[in-house]
Image (cartoon, rainbow, N blue to C red):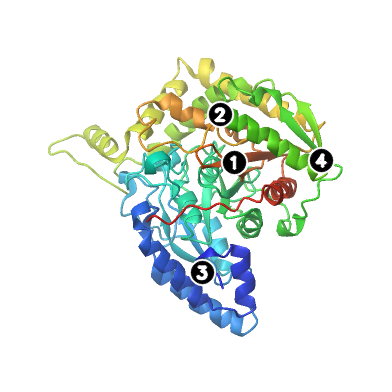
Amino acid sequence: MAALTDLTLGQMRDGLRAKDFSAKNLAEAHVKAVEAARVLNAFTVETPELALKAAEAADAALAKGEAKPLSGIPLGIKDLFATEGVQSAAASNILKGFKPAYESTVSGKLFADGAGMLGKLNMDEFAMGSSNETSAFGTVINPWRGKGNESLVPGGSSGGSSAAVAARLVAGATGTDTGGSIRQPAAFTGISGIKPTYGRCSRWGIVAFASSLDQAGPMARDVRDCAILLKSMCGFDPKDSTSLDLPVPDFEAALTGDLKGKRVGIPKEYTVEGIPAEIDALWKKGADMLRDAGAEIVDISLPHTKYALPTYYIIAPAEASSNLARYDGVRYGLREAPENGSLIDMYEATRSAGFGSEVQRRILIGTYVLSAGYYDAYYLKAQKVRALIQRDFMQAFETCDVILAPTAPSAAFGIGANVDDPIAMYLNDVFCVPASLAGLPAMSVPGGLSDDGLPLGLQIIGRPLDEEGVLNAGYAIEQAAGFTARPEAWW
C-alpha cells in the first residue's frame, strides 16, 4: 500500500471506513511528515497533540459506525483563522502570542465534522502578499525546486497551506482568498484550490484584511478533495452579516466530468501583453480539454478587466486601513511603550514594531484614498468601476456557463526575485483579482508543467453560487490533464 501521506483526502476517508488503517495511524504518519519537513517553514505552530486527540475520537466513532464526514482527516489551518487556545497571529509580530478564547466558524465546522488539526499554517502577514515573503515567521519554501536547485516561493498569501498540501504534510488545508490568495499559490505548487462565492463561507473568526473581498476556501491535492472540504466549510452563520442563508449542495456528487451542453467563455482581455508562450499554450490546451469533455468554446469580452488590478489596490488597502486600526497596543497583542512617551507615542511605536513593511505600505495607501480630499477621486471611483467589472461578468454569463483563464502569469519564481518591486509582485494577481472583485466562485487546477518542469494552473470562474459547475469543469480538466507530477522530497 502507498504511504498514508500519499493518499488523497478522499482515499483516506474511504480507507478509514474500510478499516484499512486507523485514524491514529494516519495522524502519526502526518505528524512525522510535518516534523521531517520543518525546513519548508510551512507551519507557525505545530499541534500534534490535537491531531492525535482527534484521531482517537475518530477511531472510537468509526468503531461504533458513527463516522462523521471528516472523521480522522488531519488538516492544516491557515494562521488567519482563530483557533481556540492556539496562537492565531496572522503571521504578524503584532499578534504573536495571541491565543483566542473562541473558534472561527469555518475551522469549528471542520472540527465538528471530525477533522483534526496538525497546526497553524504560515502565510503572508495579514494575508498581504503574493509570495509568502512578508510573514513575521519567515518565508515559506515551495517544495518544488527551480533551475539549479533554486528555492522558489509557494505563492501567497496562503503559501504555507499550498506548500503543506503539495509536500504531503496535510490531507488538506484552509486558505483565504482576497485577490487570488488561494488560487495563485495552488497554481505555484501543483494543487487545487477554490474560492467560493462571497458569503458561502462565514468570515467570523477570520482576521480581516478587506472585508468585502475576503473569503475562505479549501486547498487540497485534487478537485474531489476540495469538494469534500468545501461542503463542511460552507453554511449560514448568524454571526456574519454577509453569510448567505442558503442550502449547501453536495459538491462531491456534482463531479461527473461531463460538460455536454455547457459553454466555456474565453475572455479576450485576458490575453495580456508579454504573457509567456507556455501560459498561452496551456490556456489553449485547457480549452481543448473542456471541448473534449463536451463543452462548446465561445469568445467573450470583459471590457473593464484592465481596470481590475488598480481598482483592487484601492479598495483592498482602504478596507485594510480600517480593519487594522484595531491593532493599537491597547486591547491585545504587542505593546511598545516608550519611557515617558505619550499615548500617541505608544501607538506609533507599537504599530511600527508590529507591522511589516508591506502591511504598512497598504495601510498608508488605504488611509490616503479614504482621506477627505481623495475619497471621491479614488475610493468612490474604484467602487463604481468594481460595479462595472461585476456587470461585465453577468453579461458574459448570458452566453457562457463558466469562464476559462490562466491562474497566474508565470510559474513560481525565486525567493527574493520580486521582493523589492511591489508592482511586479501585485501583477501576480492580474488574472485572479477580477473574480474576487465580482464575488464569484473561482478555482485553480494544475494543467501541466512549464518548460522548467514547474506546475502551471488553469482557472475556472463561475456564476454566483455555481460552485458545482466550477468544480465539475475543474474536474474535467483534471481528468484530461492527468496531472500526477509531485515535488521530490529533497527536504
Residue depth check, mark 3 versus mark 2: number of the one nearer the observer? 3
Quadrant (top left, top right, bottom left, bottom right) of the C terminus: bottom left
Amino acid type, label 4: Ala
Q: CA distance from mark 4 to mark 2?
A: 26 Å
> Can the viewer see residue 85?
no
| Nearest to viewer (mark 3 / mark 1) | 3
Q: CA distance from mark 1 to mark 2?
A: 14 Å
Query: Residue 483, position in %: x, y?
Result: 62, 50
Name the amino acid type tagged 1. Answer: Gly
Looking at the image, is mark 4 or mark 2 nearer the viewer? 4
State whether residue 156 is above or below residue 321.
below
Q: Mark 3 = which residue?
A: 3
What x and y, as percent, mark residue 103?
A: 48, 59
Alpha carbon separation for disc pair 1 and 4:
20 Å
Relative image position of residue 411 (x, y in whole percent): 51, 37
Residue on which the image places disc 4: 295
Identity of the residue drawn at 54% across and 78% down? 22
Marks 3/1: CA–CA distance: 26 Å
